[in-house]
Image (cartoon, rainbow, N blue to C red):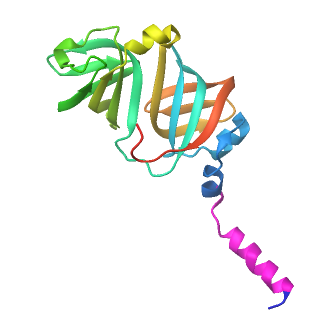
Amino acid sequence: MNLDRRILLVAAALLLIPTGRAQAQVQGQLNPGQAFATMKPGQWIRLEGALQNQGVSCNQVKLLTGAIKDSAASVRAALRGIDPTTHQLTVGPYRVRLIEHPKYGSPSGTLEFSDLRPGMFVKVEGVYGKDGIFVARKLDDESDQLAKKPELRGRVRVQGRIERTDPSKRTIIMMGTRFIVAPNAQIRSVAKSASEP
């Protein structure tokens, strides 16, 4: 086979690789332009920032690649409200319903629904429903983190699937919340396995 024919075959093969998939595999530090060019609806992402009236001012972005379970959504924020009759919570900006027998975690080792108090710093894991309610299978008390990092108060970290983006406004909609990516945000693309929290 001559050299010209081999070059054409390689070029044709490269054209068959979907560009979205190739971009999603980029690992490491990204600038906002690279990140927004890579982001697609349905892609997993982890966003962190300060909770504000208009949404979340986001200064940390992680584009997640790899095999991720559908139930890997999570919210880490202050517990703002508790409704014992419906077994619902307000965690950051989200309404959260606990499954009938959720798994609880705490540095002290024991935690039950009756131990929950507004102001605690918690992480819930589960699925965000189309009805706008986060259904949690697990709740961890991470209040001890506030003693080590008081700057976490008023912040929220959310992991889920991108609903839509607006590169011109640097916004990402995920789980019904508007995240505004700060100009100086740390943006990374990282591989994540299905077993990681």
- Residue 139 in the image: x percent, y percent? 29, 26
Q: Is residue 13 magenta?
A: yes
- Span colored in magenta: 3-19
Q: Which residue is drawn at 19% across and 18% down?
A: 113
- Check the picture and name the quadrant holding the C terminus: top left
Q: In this view, does 57 lie to the left or right of 110?
A: right
Q: Is residue 60 left or right of residue 110?
A: right
Q: Is residue 120 visible?
A: yes
Q: Which residue is drawn at 74% across and 80% down?
A: 9
Q: Quadrant of residue 91?
A: top left
- Check the picture and name the quadrant holding the N terminus: bottom right
Q: Which residue is drawn at 41% across and 47% down?
A: 194
Q: In this view, does 84 lie to the left or right of 192?
A: left
- Residue 196 in the image: x percent, y percent? 42, 41
Q: In which quarter of the image is residue 76?
A: top left
Nearer-the-camera pick, 33 or 149: 149
Asked if residue 5 is positioned above or below residue 98 in the image, the reply reads: below
Q: Which residue lies furthest to the bottom in this view?
A: 1
- Residue 157 in the image: x percent, y percent? 47, 25
- Residue 71 in the image: x percent, y percent? 34, 42
Q: Residue furthest front?
A: 108
Q: Residue at x 65, y 49 (%)?
A: 26
Asked if residue 136 is positioned above or below residue 118 in the image, the reply reads: below
Nearer-the-camera pick, 102 or 37: 102
Q: Is residue 190 magenta?
A: no
Q: In which quarter of the image is residue 129?
A: top left
Nearer-the-camera pick, 10 or 135: 10
Asked if residue 46 is positioned above or below residue 107 in the image, the reply reads: below
The chief SS type of the magenta part is: helix
Q: Can residue 153 be seen in this view?
A: no
Number of dots carrying numbers: 0
